[in-house]
Amino acid sequence: MRDAKLCPSCQMAISRTEGCNKMVCEKCGQYFCYRCNNAIDGYDHFRDGVCALFPQEMIRGWEERINARQMLGQVHAQLFADRGTPCPNCRQLNAKVGNNNHIFCWACRMHYCYLCKKIVRRSSQHYGPKGCKQHSEG
């Protein structure tokens, strides 16, 4: 527990393994900032910019994953532009690949139907005898 911080209230050693800098002591229930070790109440402490809610290296990792997903989605949409359709939620172009009419938007991660352009919350309720065909040519 080399990186452990002591709770500012009861002095119990607490280690952060992941997540944000807002910590809560399991022993006494005190909230505190893992970065500066001050007792806090709510999230107002992180608004002034001195202490960040999330460590910068964690934010960089998220941005790298998001940028990679965005790049792949854009290349995919360009390769299949003739079969592309904008997402009904965010308007980002997504491509139909093969004969599956169920589209997963790479940008906002929403599921929707290529045929009727409606958001699909449950595939089993949208596709079927009374709904759209999940698989079709073109």
Image (spheres, rainbow, N blue to C red):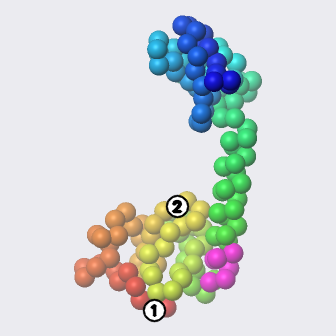
For this rendering, which residue is in front, 26 or 22? 26
Check the image and report above or below for 53 versus 67: above
Query: Outermost residue, top direction?
Result: 10
Task: Give the residue at mark 2.
Answer: 109
Find out whether residue 13 is within the magenta segment: no
Find out whether residue 78 is within the magenta segment: yes
Question: In the image, which residues are magenta?
Answer: 75-80
Residue 34 at x, y percent in the picture? 64, 23
At 70% across and 67% down in the image, what residue appears?
71
Q: Secondary structure at mark 1?
A: loop
The alpha-carbon separation of the residues under discs 2 and 1 comes to 24 Å
What amino acid is at disc 2? Arg
What amino acid is at disc 1? Glu
At 47% across and 19% down in the image, what residue appears?
26
For this rendering, which residue is in front, 63 or 77? 63
For this rendering, which residue is in front, 28 or 44? 28
Q: Secondary structure at mark 2?
A: loop
For this rendering, which residue is in front, 1 or 48? 1
Task: Give the residue at mark 1.
Answer: 137
In the displayed structure, does residue 9 sit left or right of residue 69? left
